[in-house]
Image: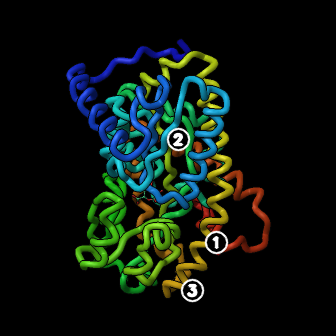
């Protein structure tokens, strides 16, 4: 056994539910894909659910994961990737992973907040001063593993992270200052911290699954949403929301979350293969991400008529400035991580070059820092 903790499911009664769900997944697979063990020569099928399209950087990263595992353990494992929320939206897919009906899910940390409040840290507005600081923070695997294991008691453990860029408001009408948000109904992820953040910005928060957002904007149920640029193209939100404002309020990573019992059932050698496959998938995803964002910006502007608005980020930051201290005070699980992020911001501040950074890569001064 490779792990130090014993797995204990919160409710043993979940077993029956798990069997039912697994049966449902098998039936689904048999009907649409390659089926369960009998149809795959006795190999263990490893199912991964995610909510993005097959062109998305995360799908590309997961294909690298699949290939890496199958090249080394292909006699024992077959990895099947289920995109486009076909096994359910993030919350549902996490629950399927928790019960063991599927083995992995890719979901934003916002969706993990209800499983462990440690993950609220990534919903904190303006936690990192730049994308570079954020990415270095996330790539410190040794440190991140202390966060990855925080959901162990829920039967889930994270294997790696994927870059999902910065989150920004986009809507049917232009948002140029925080005042423009007043009275708007903005979709957020199913995350208590994000609900609170949007309220603090002065808008009404409407939590819903990612797959429902297009129709909700189209039908006027909401005025807009907040996300990265790929939502405009991969999810076609640019067809219904024509103004994307670079306020860069959050950097919320996606996580490759595994069923803990599955991970603990692997031999040390097998686990090393799955872990290395996960690390490789992050590298592949991050490269694809850079290209994906550039392509999405071009497509959204040129083919969809989306206007990208460069706002004064400081105004947006000021609006939610009190939230950082409030979140730390309310949630003892995030204090140490917050301090660490602040130190990373400050060290970068001290070594920052005099010249102006690219507007997209740098967000805001570190706490107490100067606005340019
Ligand atoms: C991004 C993120 C997803 C998340 C989605 C959302 O696309 O990568 O993990 O589900 O935003 O806003 O729901």
**Quarter holding the C terminus?**
bottom right
Which residue is pictured at 55% across the width and 61% down the height?
55
Q: Are marks 3 and 2 in contact (CB under 8 Å)?
A: no
- Report the residue marked by disc 1: 294
Q: Are marks 1 and 2 in contact (CB under 8 Å)?
A: no
**Which circle marks residue 195 in the picture?**
none
**Which circle marks residue 302 in the picture?**
3
Q: Position of residue 340 (x, y in %)?
A: 59, 43
* Front-most of residues 277 and 177: 277
Mark 1 lies on a secondary structure that is helix
Compared to residue 12, the image places residue 198 above or below, namely below
Compared to residue 16, the image places residue 194 above or below, namely below
Mark 1 → mark 2, Cα distance in angstroms = 31 Å
Mark 2 lies on a secondary structure that is helix
Q: Quadrant of residue 276?
A: top right
| Badge 2: residue crowd in 10 Å (few <14, some 14–19, many ≥20) | some
Color style of the picture: rainbow
Upstream in the sequence, badge 3 or badge 1? 1
Q: Position of residue 39 (x, y in %)?
A: 43, 31
Q: Are marks 3 and 1 in contact (CB under 8 Å)?
A: no
Left or right of 223 in this view: 123: right
**In this rendering, which labeled residue sits more in front, label 3 or label 2?**
3
**Which circle marks residue 337 in the picture?**
2
**In this rendering, which labeled residue sits more in front, label 1 or label 2?**
1
């Amino acid at each position: 056994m490779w792990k130090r903790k014993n797995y204990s499911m919160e409710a043993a009664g979940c077993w029956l539910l798990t069997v039912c769900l697994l049966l449902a997944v098998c039936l689904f697979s048999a009907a649409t894909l390659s089926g369960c063990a009998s149809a795959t020569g006795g190999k263990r099928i490893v199912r991964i659910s995610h909510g993005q399209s097959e062109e998305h950087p995360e799908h590309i990263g997961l294909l690298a994961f699949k290939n890496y595992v199958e090249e080394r353990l292909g006699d024992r494992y077959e990895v099947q990737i289920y995109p486009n929320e076909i096994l359910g939206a993030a919350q549902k897919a996490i629950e399927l992973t928790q019960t063991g009906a599927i083995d992995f899910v890719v979901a934003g940390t916002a969706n993990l907040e209800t499983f462990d409040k440690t993950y609220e840290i990534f919903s904190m507005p303006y936690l990192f001063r730049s994308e570079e600081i954020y990415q270095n923070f996330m790539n410190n695997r040794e440190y991140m593993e202390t966060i990855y294991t925080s959901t162990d008691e829920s039967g889930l453990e994270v294997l790696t992270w994927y870059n999902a860029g910065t989150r920004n408001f986009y809507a049917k009408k232009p948002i140029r200052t925080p005042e423009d948000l007043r009275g708007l109904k903005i979709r957020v992820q199913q995350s208590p911290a994000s609900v609170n953040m949007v309220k603090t910005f002065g808008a009404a928060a409407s939590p819903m699954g990612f797959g429902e957002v297009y129709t909700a904007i189209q039908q006027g149920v909401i005025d807009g949403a907040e996300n990265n640029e790929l939502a405009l193209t991969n999810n076609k939100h640019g067809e219904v929301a024509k103004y994307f404002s670079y306020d860069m309020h959050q950097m919320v990573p996606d996580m490759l979350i595994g069923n803990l019992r599955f991970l603990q059932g692997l031999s040390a050698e097998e686990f090393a293969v799955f872990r290395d496959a996960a690390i490789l998938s992050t590298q592949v995803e991050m490269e694809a991400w850079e290209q994906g964002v550039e392509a999405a910006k071009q497509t959204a502007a040129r083919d969809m008529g989306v206007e990208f608005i460069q706002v004064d980020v400081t105004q947006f930051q000021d609006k939610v400035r009190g939230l950082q201290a409030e979140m730390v005070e309310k949630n003892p699980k995030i204090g140490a991580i917050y301090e660490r992020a602040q130190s990373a911001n400050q060290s970068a501040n001290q070594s920052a070059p005099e010249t102006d950074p690219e507007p997209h890569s740098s967000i805001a001064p570190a706490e107490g820092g100067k606005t340019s």
